[in-house]
Image (cartoon, helix red, strand yellow):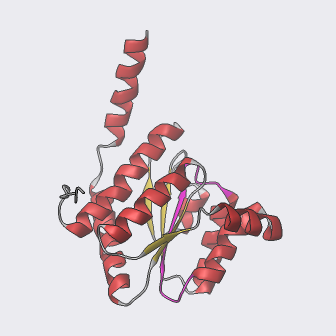
Amino acid sequence: MEKKFLENYFLRLKNLLDFKKEDIANLIAASRLMKEAQKKNKKTLIFGNGGSAAIASHFSIDLTKNAKVRCTNYNESDLLTCFSNDFGYENWVQKAIEFYADKDDILILISSSGNSQNMINAAQNAKKFGIKTIITFSGNKDGNKLQKMGDINFWVNSSSYNHIENVHQILLLSIVDLIIGKSESNFNQN
C-alpha cells in the first residue's frame, strides 16, 4: 500500500514537470525581465504564504547571492504581524509593496490556490505603486483570480499543495540557474 502510494505520488509529480512551450517561454521572459530590472538598479519583490513564503525566501536569497540579481522578500515576523495588525492580514502584502517598492520593480506573488486574498489585493494595487511586471505562481483551478492578474503566469494543474509548491520551487530555482547560465555551482568550502 505504501509502495503504491509513493509510486502514484511521484508519477503525478513527474507529469506536472512535463512543462509546455509556454512555460519555457515564460521562464525565459521572467529571467530577462529580472536581469533588465537589475541593470536599471531595480529589484524583484517576492511574497508567499506558509510553504510558499519559505520558497520565496529560498528564491530571494539564491537570486541575490548566486545570480547577482537583487531580490527581496518580506517574511520577517515583526513586519508581517505589524502590517497584519494595523492593516488586516488581507492587506499586509499590498502595504509592504506600497512602502518598499520602487517604480519599475518586478513583483512575484505565490498562491497555491490562486485565491489568497492578500495576494489578490496586492496584484490589484501593485501597478499604482509603480510595479512594472507581475509574475504569478498558482495552482488548483485554471483561470484562478491571481492568474488573471499576472503579466506572466505559472499555473500547476493540481490541487495537491505539496505538488504545487514543489513545482513552484523547481520553476523559481530554474530562473536562478538560467540567469547564472549553469545548474551547478562551485561552493566555497572553508
Q: Nearer the viewer, residue 132 or 82?
A: 82
Residue at 31 percent across and 75 percent down: it is: 68
Please say whether residue 104 is one of the residues in the magenta stretch. Answer: yes
174 relative to 129, above or below: above
Q: Quadrant of residue 62?
A: bottom left
Q: Nearer the viewer, residue 85 or 144?
A: 85
Can the viewer see residue 33 in this picture? yes
Residue at 28 percent across and 68 percent down: it is: 28
The majority secondary structure of the magenta stretch comes to loop
Spot occupied by residue 16 in the image (x, y as percentages of width and height): 36, 41
186 relative to 83, above or below: above
Residue at 43 percent across and 85 percent down: it is: 42
Image quadrant occupied by the C terminus: bottom left
183 relative to 12, above or below: below
Please say whether residue 102 is one of the residues in the magenta stretch. Answer: yes
What segment is highlighted magenta in the picture?
101-116
Q: Nearer the viewer, residue 22 or 57?
A: 57
Q: Residue furthest top?
A: 1
Spot occupied by residue 8 in the image (x, y as percentages of width and height): 38, 22
Q: Nearer the viewer, residue 22 or 58?
A: 58
